[in-house]
Amino acid sequence: MASSGAGTGTGTGGGSERRDRSRATAAASAPSTDVRTMFLLLHSVTEDNIRFFRQNSSETGRRFVTAFSQIQEHGRHLQPLVQNFTRIFPIFDFDEQTPANGYRSLIKVVRSCILHIIHKSRYITGNRRSIFFRTNHNCMEIEAYCSALCQLRALVYFAQRLLTANKHGDLFFGEEKGLSEDFLLESNSMHKGCFYGRCLGFQFTPAIRPFLQTISIGLVSFGENYRKHDTGLGVAATSIFTSGKYAIDPELRGSEFERLTQNLDVHFWKSFWNITETEVLASLVTLTSTTVRVNKTLSVPPNPFKMPMQADPSLMVDISPPVAHSGPGPVQMRLISYELRDGQDSDELNELCKPEAQLGLDMRLKTKKAPRSKFLIVHFHGGGFVAQTSKSHEAYLKSWAHELDSPILSVDYSLAPEAPFPRALEECFFAYCWAINNCHLLGSTGERICLAGDSAGGNLCLTVSMRAASYGIRMPDGIMAAYPATLLQASASPSRLLTFIDPLLPLSVLSKCLSAYAGTEAASGIPRITEKTDALSLIGNDAAALLLRDIRLGASAWLNSLMDSSKSSNKPGEETFHHFPPHLPANFSNP
């Protein structure tokens, strides 16, 4: 799941209105000059091309004139709005050292679009007389960016309404009616196909665009073959042969991407994201990932147990098994360890292993056991609460186990919509408590226990910690929550406007996942369609590999700093909250 980025805070960090305004005034002059220069340049390059193509009586010439004229109009209306926003940016920054909020992000996307148009217009100016100039191709590029700028203009207008309606310094609209309703209507009515075609990923670094193109082509191709085959692998295999048209026709890809994200239900997204669970792709990942000595899948029975209270260990609290929706049931987990450690080959642990999991242990090394690590990582995978398992995340978990010298327990919690909230939370909390009580079986002394998770898993890290605090038991020593879903209400905010054009998780898809998790999938207001729809292989490329490598290494470094930091003089567990970002919204808990 994706959260709202840097703009998810709900206030200014406690500064007075007068200080905020003086900061804003001091920071405004240079950015305003840059804005004026950018819009003057936009007008200049478009005007030059308008004069040239007016002399061309062809249909393409008229299309050029129309597109450039519309870009000029959008620029005239956007300039005063962008200048106004640049003046108020500092009001919403967390502090002077953190110049980031949703308004900054939105205007940066607008600037990026305009700079792309300027660059393309200059290219057209320099090459339009050449016999090698691809007239129709370049015309379609300009038309696509003109359409994107039009939609961004609508988002900026909405952001202006939000700025006017909110209390001073607030980023979120606090009511369920009014702008929050308009926010959802705007999402459904906005034409977003241009952002998934020729303009895909313009707001990001060029290195990531091939990765985004691969994912988008794979998605629309998968959609074309969806429900024609019984298995995700069959859909993916067929999609390889039907994906070419989406690679060469960006407009077709964009319109199909928009149709899929708006119309197909959560079961489609579950099938698409679970492609990585297929045996063929899982085997490829296994061949290329770090080799570990222990990779066991465990099934922990739903037996209640007791844990000591943090404040007074002589007092015990009952930990009940998960029961929501389907009654008591075992909790599935995966234990990963780079080395075989004391306890990991015990009969007590082996009794919890699934039969096929015995192959996850290199039996030749049973006599060469390493001592227990003082660390333990409890991991909750992402997947929008509806898809994926620990197997999907196994590649980087193996690397973490090696780099951090720590065993990792990854929890395979039950997924929505079959098991909505609070089943996943109950299972993750039960697994966390069981891990604390059974560190000796997992190859850890339990001296430092960290929670880690991405997206939906990040949400579960936070909510499990909150539940541990409410029970009064030991809190985790650290939390590594990567892009966690923290505010699950449909509240309008500037950075949430950017989910309208997100190339990986648009707002409509996020809404489907959250509706499924909350158990209100049928009430989402988005009709299901039953037509059979198409898709490509999800084999990555160099850009994707670099991106995933950076995410893995960054998370690994963060976990390492959490586990290696020296304990404070507080009582055990009291320093836990220091690892939370201090600007988390107050209502960041459960949906």
Image (cartoon, rainbow, N blue to C red):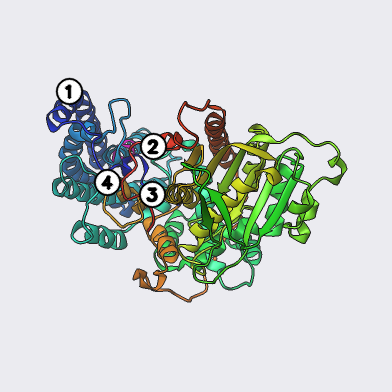
Q: In this view, does 442 lie to the left or right of 113?
A: right
Q: Nearer the viewer, mark 4 or mark 2?
A: 2
Residue 139 relative to residue 544: left or right: left
Q: Name the residue under label 3.
A: 486
Of the numbered discs in the image, which one, if any, rests on residue 26?
1
Q: Tag 4 or tag 1, which sits nearer the N-term?
A: 1
Label 4: element kind: helix
The Cα–Cα distance between marks 1 and 3, rounded to whole angstroms, is: 33 Å
- Work out how far the residue at label 3 is from the one at label 2, CA to CA, in angstroms: 12 Å
CA–CA distance in space, label 4 to label 3: 16 Å
Check whether the beta carbons of the residues at disc 1 and disc 4 lie within 8 A of each other: no
Q: Nearer the viewer, mark 4 or mark 3?
A: 3
The foreground one among 177 and 184 is: 177
Give the residue type at disc 4.
Pro
Between 430 and 377, the one lying in front of the other is 430
Report the residue that reaches farthest toward the front. Answer: 314
Which label was assigned to residue 581? 2
* CB atoms of marks 1 and 3 within 8 Å: no
Cα separation, mark 2 vs mark 1, equals 28 Å
Q: Earlier in the sequence, mark 2 or mark 1?
A: 1
Tag 3–tag 2 contact (CB < 8 Å): no
Q: Distance between the residues labelled 1 and 4?
A: 23 Å
Separation (CA) of disc 4 from disc 2? 20 Å
- Residue 67 is at least partly visible in this image: no
Q: Give the residues drawn in magenta, as a range.
A: 110-115
Q: In the rendering, at what x and y percent does residue 26 appear?
A: 17, 23
Query: Image height check: is 456 above or below 224?
Result: above
